[in-house]
Image (cartoon, helix red, strand yellow):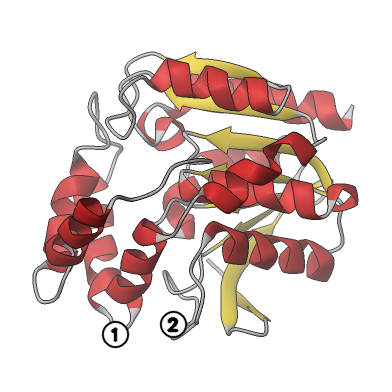
Amino acid sequence: MNTQFLSTSGGKIAYDISGSGPLVICAPSMGDVRAEYRFLAPRLVSAGFRVACMDLRGLGESSTGQDDYSATAVGADMLALIEALGGPAILIGDSMAGGAAAWAAAERPAALRGLVLIDPFVRGEVSTAGALFYKLLFARPWGAAAWSMYYTSLYPSRKPTGFADYSADLRANLSEPGRLEALQQMLLASKTPVEKRLPEVKAPTLVLMGSKDPDFKNPEGEAAFVAGALRGKYQMIPGAGHYPHAEMPDEACPPILTFLQALTA
């Protein structure tokens, strides 16, 4: 990857870009890096899109030490990258980044052509007990190893090619100064600011959800809620977990591509 950096008021956001055509920005789940889209991005480029994959603030190659790691802050980074690269854009966001993408669409409707929200978190608060649990579980020196074990559970049916090496790289990244602390703050951040803005989103939306995502008690129920709130549509990927586009790219990538092509036809 040819890493580039976008300077923001809080630090630097790392990204890479390839292809030509309508702009698509892909943002990974918390605790992951932009290489999460290693299976989807090449397919989008081949289909005629200009694809930018970004690291979330504090993770990957983006800078640490920022004062806000909430979904709204990540959404602001998305909008800054759209402005820098020349929008409008289609935003693809996984997990917490899905909520950030929805917030960005509400904040600046003209900057967005559409949204693809993959297993998104758009609502909910962490309880006091839950916050204490996360702080202990992902504290140093064992936090990066604990996240690595949890991360493996998010692929319930199959592991992508090279998964062991990829997981080891994620663990090494989280072991770097400031990155585990950024992850902790993302985990604890309220999703209420995103949920309040859902009625304002006008962008066409596709919600993609793995039927075995362990992060949701009822994955299809959550997908239906998000799609309904955004007046969009949802599609389940049977057997997939939290990363359907990486766990089952042959099943998950085609509906994303079909949706994007319809938006830009």
Q: Position of residue 103 (x, y in %)?
A: 67, 50
Mark on residue 64?
2
Name the quarter where the C terminus is drawn. Answer: top right
For disc 1, the marked residue is: 177
Quadrant of the rendered image containing residue 156: top left
The answer to whether mark 2 and mark 1 are in CB contact below 8 A is yes
- Badge 2 marks a residue whose secondary structure is loop
- From the viewer's perspective, is 120 left or right of 186? right
- From the viewer's perspective, is 261 left or right of 149? right
Quadrant of the rendered image containing residue 114: top right
Q: What residue type is disc 1 on?
A: Pro
- Badge 1 marks a residue whose secondary structure is loop
- From the viewer's perspective, is 20 left or right of 54? right
Quadrant of the rendered image containing residue 214: top left
Q: Position of residue 80 (x, y in %)?
A: 75, 69
Q: Position of residue 215 (x, y in %)?
A: 31, 35
Rendered residue at 35%/32% (across/down): 247
The residue closer to the viewer here, 61 or 193, is 193
Rendered residue at 69%/45% (across/down): 197
Rendered residue at 46%/43% (across/down): 95
Q: Position of residue 56 (x, y in %)?
A: 51, 65
Q: Is residue 31 visible?
A: no
Rendered residue at 50%/81% (across/down): 67
Residue 236, above or below 204: above
